[in-house]
């Protein structure tokens, strides 16, 4: 993989990691079309960049949630138990991911990605019709953890799936947005820990890290803007079009 290819894939990762369009699906597609294969270290550097962006973007919320979860403060705060809810979600995410992981290779084809993009399309479009008014509870945390686990499948957007399921359960859109990304922190960090021993360094990887971080921060800011204006469902246009294009080209 040369520098231009790594920068291109970094931009793709940065845009698609947080928008509800499936970053893993896009990487499968572009790696297939460009006839390149990103190695483990490259992928890990991209995900570290994504993790850094979440930690920075939600730094105030993270401090608040940890403080609320570990102290007796804020008993009436709707986010009082979020620290433990995220831990609960993570248990179910890991359980589903471990079950699906052996089958991931069978899904890393353009055809499979197109099929899962259609599921993403349906989930994202369904948010057009919901009214959000509830606070997150422990059983919501279980459901969202399960949803995140299924999103290991390339083409099934993690953010799209978690946010759509949250909104379908009538969770307030602000809480749906924040929880969808905060619950990703343990998942991304866990995958990093599992692979850190196999990492190698290259200046190309460092460049990819910087590009991914900058682009993903902009993408996350865009998604928050879209959510605030109740236009999240419009992303279905892109995922539907991409899925149909893939099927047409196969």
Image: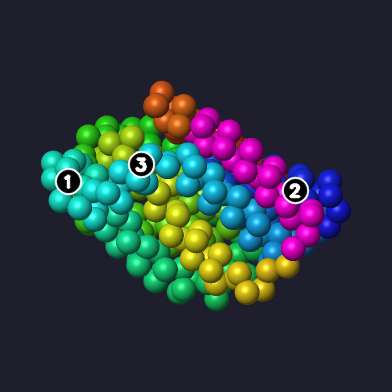
Name the residue tied to disc 1: 73
Q: Is residue 128 magenta?
A: no
Q: CA distance from mark 1 to mark 2?
A: 42 Å
Residue plotted at (59% across, 55% down): 48
For marks 1 and 2, give the one nearer the viewer.
1
Query: Residue 2, image x and y in percent?
Result: 86, 53
Query: Residue 61, image x and y in percent?
Result: 36, 41
Circle nearer the N terminus (1, 2) = 1
Residue plotted at (48% across, 51% down): 158
Residue plotted at (39% across, 57% down): 147
Q: Along the line of sight, which residue is nearer the eye, 122 or 58?
A: 58
Residue plotted at (51% across, 59% down): 188
Query: Residue 207, image x and y in percent?
Result: 75, 48
User: Is mark 1 in CB contact (under 8 Å) with mark 2?
Assistant: no
Q: Residues within 10 Å of mark 3 (few under 14, many from 20)?
A: some
Q: In the displayed structure, does residue 71 sit left or right of residue 192?
A: left
- Which numbered disc covers residue 61? 3
Q: In the displayed structure, does residue 69 sit left or right of residue 185?
A: left
Circle nearer the N terminus (1, 3) = 3
Name the residue tied to disc 2: 207
Circle nearer the N terminus (2, 3) = 3
Q: Residues within 10 Å of mark 1 (few under 14, many from 20)?
A: few
Q: CA distance from mark 2 to mark 3?
A: 29 Å
Q: Secondary structure at mark 1?
A: loop
Is residue 63 visible in the rendered structure shown here? yes
Q: Residues within 10 Å of mark 2 (few under 14, many from 20)?
A: some
* Residue at the right extreme of this rendering: 2
Q: Main secondary structure of the magenta part?
A: helix
Q: Along the line of sight, which residue is nearer the eye, 170 or 4?
A: 4
The stretch in magenta equals 201-223
Q: Is residue 227 above or below residue 33?
A: above
Q: Along the line of sight, which residue is nearer the eye, 168 or 92?
A: 92
């Amino acid at each position: 993989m040369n520098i231009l290819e790594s920068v291109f894939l970094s931009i793709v990762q940065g845009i698609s990691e947080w928008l509800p369009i499936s970053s893993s699906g896009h990487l499968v597609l572009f790696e297939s079309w460009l006839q390149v294969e990103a190695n483990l270290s490259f992928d890990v550097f991209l995900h570290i960049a994504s993790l850094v962006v979440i930690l920075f973007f939600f730094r105030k919320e993270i401090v608040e949630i940890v403080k609320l979860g570990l102290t007796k403060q804020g008993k009436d705060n709707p986010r009082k138990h979020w620290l433990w809810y995220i831990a609960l979600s993570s248990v179910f995410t890991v359980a589903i991911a471990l079950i699906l992981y052996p089958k991931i290779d069978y899904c890393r084809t353009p055809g499979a990605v197109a099929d899962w993009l259609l599921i993403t399309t349906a989930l994202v479009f369904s948010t057009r019709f919901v009214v959000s008014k509830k606070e997150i509870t422990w059983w919501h945390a279980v459901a969202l953890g399960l949803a995140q686990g299924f999103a290991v499948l390339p083409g099934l957007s993690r953010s799209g799936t978690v946010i759509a399921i949250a909104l379908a359960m009538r969770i307030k859109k602000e809480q749906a947005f924040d929880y969808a990304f905060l619950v990703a922190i343990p998942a991304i960090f866990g995958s990093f820990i599992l692979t850190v021993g196999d990492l190698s360094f290259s200046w190309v990887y460092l460049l990819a890290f910087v590009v991914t971080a900058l682009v993903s921060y902009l993408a996350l800011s865009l998604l928050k803007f879209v959510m605030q204006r109740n236009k999240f469902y419009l992303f279905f246009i892109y995922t539907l079009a991409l899925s149909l294009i893939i099927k047409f080209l196969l």
